[in-house]
Image: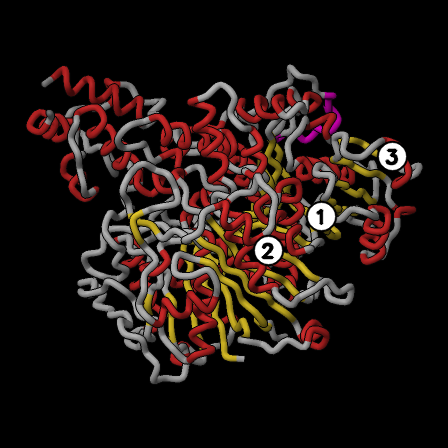
Amino acid sequence: MSIYITSVGVISAIGLNVEENYRSLKNKKTGIAPIKFLDLNKNILAGEVKLSNEDLIERLNVSSPISRTSLLGLAAAKEAWKGHQHNDAIRTGLISATSVGGMDNTEKYYKQRLETESPDISLVTTHDSGNTTERIAKALGISGYINTLSTACSSGANAIMLGARLMQQNKLDRVLVGGSDSFTHFTEEGFRSLMIYSDEWVKPFDENRDGLNLGEGGGFLVLENDKSLAITNNKPLATLAGWANTADAYHQTASSPDGKGATLAISNALKKGSINPSKVSYVNAHGTGTPNNDLSESVALINVFKDNVPPFSSTKAYTGHTLAASGAIEAVYSILALQHNVIFPNLNFSTPITDTKLVPVVNLNKEQEVNIVLSNSFGFGGNNSTVIFKKA
Amino acid sequence: MEDLKEKLKEQIIDRLNLEDVNVTDFSDDMPLFGGGLGLDSIDALELIVLLENDYGIELANPEEGKEIFDTINSLADYIQKNRK
Amino acid sequence: MYINACSTISHQNSFQNENWINELTLLDENNELITPNYKEFIAPTALRRMSKIIRMGLTCAKDCVKQSGIENPDAIIVGTALGCLADTEKFLNNALTLKGLIPPTAFIQSTHNTIAGQISLELKNHNYNVTHTQNSLSFEHALIDAILCLNEDDSNILVGAVDEEIPLLGELTGQFGLDSIKNKLTSSASFFMLSNNKTETSKAKLVDSYTVGLNTSDSKKIINEFLERNNTSLADVDLVLSNSYGTVSDSEIKNLFDSIEVIPVEQHTGYHLTTAAFGMHLATEMINQKSGNQILIYNTLNNSNIGLTLLQSLEA
């Protein structure tokens, strides 16, 4: 049974919709900059979405309080959902992914609580991850199967594969899947405390990489089965061809040096889709720019593909690391690569990692057919996931 | 120097929640990581926080910690030489 | 699908106590969480960093592994409504009050997937690993995922739910005017080993689990259709374990279930959003002790959502 992707939506530091994101990717234009929207009182680099909460609320026509995580999710979900409507004959679900949910509002509350007598408790009503998703569902008029996954930085990819599995087992006909996260003080301090937040522009897969820049955003995809397509008459953009979720079981935050979990995720996803590794046209890597992730992921790529590692790049230097949203945002980028036969360049790369010598794609590749794209998402807690997209 | 070592042991027990460890349980030359006291990379980050916040010593690169955090002796020695 | 192991840490004497369902008490505000000596289950090097929620979850998970003899389950699936609240608050507080570097441990332990991640680390398990966090339906969603796995190629799935109470939660609940809940907030963990294979430790069958979010306009229809899809009807349900905590009136419950006995799970668990998992353990033991052939777990803790889970005896 085929899982069709019929529309996508994305909002990130490099654009407010799919078209803007594609243009930035093609033009090697990063969205990472000194922060402007989150008031942290310090000068750091992050991939912020270039809209304030007030602007987002107005554009999306929703009521406050609502978390920035919900707003970013809704912006992307709305774009993907355009033209879709309720239909009793199509069993529809929504699966979103987030790592910190409404933390952006919770930290505002907590700060007020520490500093003032009467903090605004309405801000904590948006804390739980489930609420983040329900706000998106309500705004789009979706009810029924509504779920949220939280597996740190692999969450978005897991939402996509859960949607596909529910369809394969005939529980749903159409699922809106994706994820969102907002840039917060909590996560910024968190990654800084792990000493992996770089104060320079992130350099994925470079020997001299020294950590990540955080980002924020949302990405959503509409998955449909044949039955749903027959009713909606939508034209597939791509199919979801393979997926896998594995556990590294090595360390709470670090990836194993032998890339065990990542290797399993990539090879199991290929197996699931019966895809010969040599047929993969492009790998959209997790590539966070931390010393640990990029080495472990490079080792995993070599484990699976041996001497024939496909053209690969990380798009984190455009968007920053968008945590739970990254798997969904990069799924959208993978589909753009299939649609336009392009491979997006990896920014800020100059020197290959000594141990692995892998060189990512650094210039926009337009010369080749892109038929199969593999996208990796690896997270804290050893949660590793890979999804594979194929030309429709 | 002996006072500093004693204080470090107490701080390590406190910051790393080593509930079942007493100051007398670790000798000055016992490896803190791996087979000795059994600390791991998360503890190393906690020790970097300790160095910076309690002794004013900044380690920009966690890798530097490896030698410094080898034993109580090496840690005390480093603090002695670098504290502000 | 068979339930081959269950393990619960709660405000009841439920952990490693075969007879616990016969010792159930009605909770009052003085009942505390009854915890085992965690040192018997978790190495001190790991235990020292763990908050209540991680200790509870990991211990129940390991207990299920021991009971079932399945050391390498094909998937580890956890549901948690609010996740690691204690570490989240601790890190948030530090981030907003400390100058300079902030200790990283609470951040590392604050993410929702910490529990499932720790279980995989402890079991050295490389298989499917996921965390569902859909407020009152977090457990049912974990269960539905486990059922998907069992219908794919997997044979044994470790699945459970856990939530923890922290003082700030009580404070906020009070400020929201939810006084009926404020003093009844509790913590618990319940884990299960589900399997396609009937073994000598099998206690009951899991038939199905189902959720409806943001639409409970016709609960009766939703319940009847769920039972119908599973080739049964309310007439054959012996008992309903409800998790509703005042969101559904007594008359509404009466209207839904008529003369079927309904036990409110909250009177034994207190209030948190994943009590349906406790309900499933309770139902499993009741079926195992022949107190019913078919038990429905009904969850409307969030009154715009509904969760349904159906269990049957091994003979049914």
Residue C214: assigned label: 1
Label 2 belongs to which residue? Answer: A95
- Crowd around label 1: few <14 · some 14–19 · many ≥20 (10 Å): some
Mark closer to the observer (2, 3): 2
Q: Quadrant of the N terminus of chain C?
A: bottom right
Outermost left residue: B81
Q: Residue at x 37, y 60 (%)?
A: A286
The residue range painted magenta reads C15-26
Q: Main secondary structure of the magenta part?
A: loop
Residue C146 in view here: no
Spatial separation of the CA atoms under disc 2 and disc 1: 14 Å
| Residue C104 image position (x, y, % from top left) | 34, 35
Chain under numbered label 3: C
Label 3 belongs to which residue? Answer: C261
Q: Under tag 2, what secondary structure?
A: strand
Mark closer to the observer (1, 3): 1
- Image height of B72 relative to C74, above or below: above
Q: Quadrant of residue A95?
A: bottom right
- Please tell me if label 2 and label 3 are on a single chain: no
| Residue C38 image position (x, y, % from top left) | 48, 28
Q: Under tag 3, what secondary structure?
A: strand
Q: Quadrant of residue A305?
A: bottom left
A148 with respect to B29 (left or right): right
A204 with respect to C210 (left or right): left
- Image height of A213 relative to C136, above or below: below
A14 with respect to B51 (left or right): right
Residue C276 in view here: yes
Spatial separation of the CA atoms under disc 1 and disc 3: 27 Å
Q: Residue at x 81, y 47 (%)?
A: C217
The mark total stands at: 3
